[in-house]
Amino acid sequence: MASFAHVNGLRLHYLDHAGGEPLLVLMHGLSANAHCFDGLVRAGLSPRYRVISVDLRGRGLSDKPASGYSMADHAADILGLLDTLGTGPVVLGGHSFGGLLTFYIAAHWPERVSRMLIFDAGSMHPRVRELLKPSLARLGKLLPSVDAYLNAARLAPYLNGLWDESAEAYFRADVQANPDGTAQSRSSPEAITEAMERVLSEPWSEYLPRARAPALLLNAVEGFGPPGTPPIVPPELAQETARALPHCRYLVVPGNHTTMLFGGNASHTVKAITDFLST
């Protein structure tokens, strides 16, 4: 169910998938949206658990202020959402940028986080800006129609041919149709640029040891693009992150930085999550 919360001076959009305990609150990657977890939900994450997936500020259907994309700004939004929902400590998780936001919140407000689910985030590849270019290239790009936008997304090299109902729903949530029939990404290029520069400037080596909630770090080690392209988070850097966290389980899952969340790969990711939460 799609809902909105008024928090921290803006309107935040989120998806609320019914299910059992514990409550999972999930945050997407840098330029993504709440539907990036649809593949996991379809693979059974809900209704086994209640899953709330958030459109972070500047993305999806959430408000898009001209500035204010620091980790502190994002964290205030999520804490405001948790207050609105009236929850106790939650299983907090995120993909990529959302995983870093999970670390940030767990380090600064440990009482709000019972466990952490980290989807391919951590000590990043030194070429991260270059590696993210294929997925960020759509931002601000005007295409003749929504269908043209979806066709371009379907052919993206980092998807490796993976396209299913959940992947299409994610990209449909990403696209905005203009009055003249043209289409473009809903995410603001300026917002994404500010968010990326802010996140890269944070002292993560100080935060990780303070994020003491039990964590599961899932690492997708396939290349993010054509053959020969390295993964976004190489195993050695993911393992470095896992070692820096006081209580972290590290696990490799099939797929790359994006495809780990969709298709058959989503079933492996969901199994890893349920195994972790059942112990």
Image (cartoon, rainbow, N blue to C red):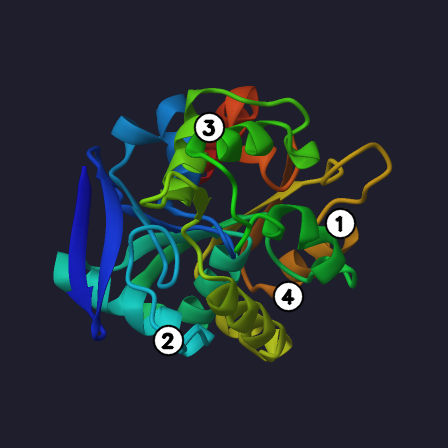
How packed is label 1: few (under 14 Cα within 10 Å), some, or many (20 or more)? Answer: many
Whole-angstrom CA distance, mark 2 to mark 3, is: 34 Å
* Secondary structure under the numbered disc 1 in the rendered image: loop
Residue 13 position within the rendered picture, expressed as x and y whole percent measured from the top left:
25, 53
Labels 2 and 3: the sequence-earlier one = 2
Residue at the spot of label 4: 244
Q: Where is residue 181 shown, x and y percent of the image?
A: 38, 38
Amino acid at the residue labelled 4: Ala
Q: Earlier in the sequence, mark 1 or mark 2?
A: 2
The label number, if any, that marks residue 147 in the structure image: 3
Residue at 64%, 66% (x, y): give it: 244
Residue 221 appears in which quarter of the rendering? top right
Where disc 2 sits, the SS reads helix
Element class at badge 3: helix
Question: Could you say which is closer to the camera, residue 66 or residue 226?
Answer: 66
Front of the two marks 2 and 4: 2
The reply to whether dot 2 and dot 3 touch (C-beta < 8 Å) is no
**Residue at which label 1 appears:** 234
Residue type, numbered disc 2: Asp
In percent of the image, x 57 and y 68: which residue is there? Answer: 196
- Assess whether mark 1 and mark 4 are in contact (beta carbons under 8 angstroms): no
Alpha carbon separation for disc pair 1 and 2: 28 Å
